[in-house]
Amino acid sequence: MVAGSKRSGRARPAYGPSDAGEFFDRWMADAERDCPLRDPDAPRYGHSTPRIHTPPLRDLTPDTSAGYSCIEFSHDVLGIPLLPWQQETLIRALELNRAGTRFRFRTVVLLVARQNGKSTLAQALCLWAMYVLGVKMTLGTAQDLDIAEELWSGCVDIAESVPELAATIKNVNKVNGKKSLDLQTGERYKVKASNRKAGRGLSADLIVLDELREHTNWDSWGAVTKTMMARPKAQTWCLSNAGDDASVVLMSLRKKAHLALGDPDGINADDTDLTASGGDSLCLIEYSAAPGRATTDRDGWAESNPSLGYTVEEASLEAAEATDPEPVFRTECMCQWVDVMAVGPFPEGAWEACTDPRGIIPDDAPISYAVDVSWDRGAAYVAACGPQASGRLQVEIVAARPGQGWAEWLPEWFRGFVDADNPARVVVQGKACPAAILVDTLADVEGLTVVPWVGGDLGIGCGLIYDQVAAAAPESTSSLKPLAHRGQEALNLAAHTAAQRFYGDGWYWDRKNSPQDAAPLIAATEALWDQITNAPEEPATSIYEAGPQPLA
């Protein structure tokens, strides 16, 4: 029992061997007792030991882990005493291989709730790597460049404030998009945007990927991590709290690490083909609330907030739990995964109730098509809307492709089934969006009528789709026939996460501020609006004969 507390603040490892040994335990006990940020009146402390972690190969001592060196550098040189959990993380993650010649792990995944001090830990790590290890290239990146630059800026401020470190600085480049910290001895810390071009042409020794949950594809991961292929002693650190089903990179890494530990939370039950990562490749350090804990479970708060009682107050978590939507609190404050992070725009359960996986639009039904392009111009979608045999309107995505070649493939897709004898109509937002340039391009397709979606029509269309989805809500009293959709992944994700932009008494979908791609939902909204307001003529070709391209 730690002096001055009602509980130990330590969670014994749930999986693997008895963990690090006598030296490590003694070190951590001293760290917990002597931490200057420790509140002697705090009713409970966060767990310094992660609930789930990759176990060490042997006892962790200064001879078997470089983490001790980083901790001492942070305390003695930077003047930053690290919290017990930060110390434990460094000791685990910087374990050496059996020969003592390099780090055991190439990739470290750190999962912990927000505002617990990931940035402080990362700053100590980066500066130690530069000044003590002498790594030639440290590369920082994040999906939001501002986050990576904030971490870098903190490192610069610390280095400039310590005379012996400041004396070795050669240059600080603060130009946006080109920020770097260069030492006279050749070490460099650069910041790059997280995209397909990130880090290309560079060789990195230390990579810090912040907010990994925001990586919804593998493009930036593939570009950034390959910068360390020729660096045998390199290491990638992935920092994040929990994500949702869109966090494809983080989800994959976590699943592989859990599988190597015997799948303690059962997250791989449905992935029978998944293979575990190599034991000396991936390190998982996960501070998360155990599955099944209620949002009010304070033991879960202690599991996921290791800074509780030091820099995080229990009252702050109480306030967040009382005001946050449940998915937000679970991911941000309990580091628990959810299916969808954002609170959707439709009434709870309504979109799910509209699902009709076997729904068919008959061959002789009038069809409305619509096209929309994602805010970053990285993908395009074609939606169709038409009545089922029952008269219930159905929307679905009938074509979609990633990449920026949509101005070329979209006209050709329509030419595949539209001509003077088989006319069709397509809705395109006519102003203030990436798709606007398609108005003239698609008008050149013989037999294709382009219907601009502009002005007040945006609000009308959004209101129409909202009403038809809301009609399916469990407590709805609407006389409308609910909208039908086939449960396509891209459309589901957009419908669960799309943001709304309000104007006057109306609103429309907000591409830029939606956490996921809203374009599939916008295309579906346009098609529904046209179907209801413009009563298209019956086409001669079924949408199921038009060469639809199912989403990957």
Image (tube, rainbow, N blue to C red):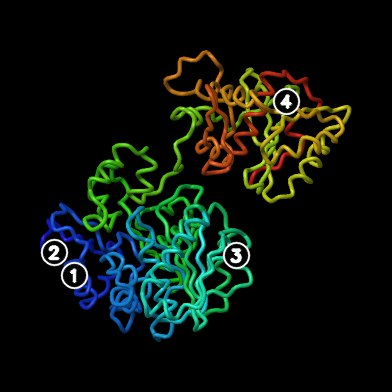
Residue 71 locus on image (x, y percent): 31, 74
Q: Gap between marks 2 and 3, in whole Å?
A: 45 Å
Which residue matches tag 1?
29
Residue density around tag 1, few if under 14, some if 14–19, many if 20 or more, within 10 Å: some
Dot 1: what SS? helix
Residue 85 locus on image (x, y percent): 28, 64
The answer to the question of whether label 1 and label 4 lie on touching residues, with beta carbons closer than 8 A, is no
Q: Which of the two labelled residues, at mark 2 and mark 3, occupies the earlier sequence position?
A: 2
Q: Which mark is residue 6?
A: none
Please name the residue shown 63% across and 43% down the image: 374
Q: Residue furthest right?
A: 420
Q: Gap between marks 1 and 2, in whole Å?
A: 8 Å
Q: Is residue 63 above or below residue 207?
A: below
Q: Gap between marks 4 and 3, in whole Å?
A: 42 Å
Q: How many marks?
A: 4
Q: Gap between marks 3 and 1, in whole Å?
A: 41 Å
Q: Quadrant of residue 529?
A: top right
Q: Is residue 476 above or below residue 99?
A: above
Which residue matches tag 3?
223
